[in-house]
């Protein structure tokens, strides 16, 4: 083999090796990004689940207070209606936050929950497959 041909083959080999190394580096980077995103989603999912559990505990506690207020009224110690209203509104607020968390959890699972009828839709759907309402959040 003459020297020029050998140099040419060596040069081709080096080019090929650099391209392969570049491709492998890119694949590793893409893989690392995907793994990082998956780990981030897993952490977010766990936090949302924990938040839903905590909110559920708060709802039950608030419902117990409401029950006590209603029973006090029944037993002859009428509850001031503003106090009862505030307790009921606190439950509404907690339930709204639970719904938001459930929607975020569904989104992480690739599902969109309809805010009107509660049906589960695919992430790509722009309208609810059950009731036809736009899925905007
Ligand atoms: Zn719907």
Image (spheres, rainbow, N blue to C red):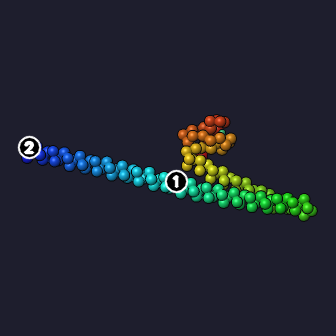
Residue 83: mark: none
Q: Is residue 78 visible?
A: no
Q: Which residue is situated farthest in the front direction here?
A: 1
136 or 122: nearer the eye? 122
Q: Is residue 12 left or right of residue 78?
A: left
Residue 17 shown left or right of residue 56 in the figure: left
Q: Residue furthest bottom?
A: 77
Q: Mark 2: is the Cβ under 8 angstroms from ligand 1?
A: no
Q: Nearer the viewer, mark 2 or mark 1?
A: 2
Task: Residue at 57%, 40% (x, y): give it.
Answer: 122
At which x and y percent is residue 121? 60, 40
* Position in image of residue 2 (x %, y %): 7, 44
Q: Choose between 34 and 88: the one closer to the eye.
A: 34
Q: To which residue does mark 1 refer?
A: 41
Q: Which mark is residue 1?
A: 2
Asked whether the beta carbons under mark 2 and mark 1 sit within 8 Å of each other, the answer is no
Residue 17 in the image, given as x and y percentages of width and height: 24, 49
Alpha carbon separation for disc pair 2 and 1: 57 Å
Locate the N terminus and report the quarter of the image it occupies.
top left
- Quadrant assignment for ligand 1: top right
* Residue sitting at x 65%, y 56%: 52
């Amino acid at each position: 083999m003459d020297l020029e041909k050998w140099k040419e083959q060596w040069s081709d080999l080096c080019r090929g090796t650099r391209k392969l190394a570049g491709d492998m580096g890119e694949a590793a980077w893409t893989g690392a990004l995907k793994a990082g995103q998956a780990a981030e989603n897993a952490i977010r999912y766990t936090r949302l689940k924990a938040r839903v559990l905590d909110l559920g505990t708060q709802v039950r506690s608030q419902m117990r207070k409401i029950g006590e207020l209603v029973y006090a009224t029944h037993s002859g110690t009428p509850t001031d209606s503003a106090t009862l209203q505030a307790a009921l509104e606190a439950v509404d607020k907690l339930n709204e936050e639970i719904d938001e968390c459930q929607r975020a959890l569904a989104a992480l699972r690739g599902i969109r929950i309809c805010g009107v009828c509660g049906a589960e839709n695919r992430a790509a759907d722009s309208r609810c497959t059950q009731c036809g309402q736009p899925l905007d959040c």
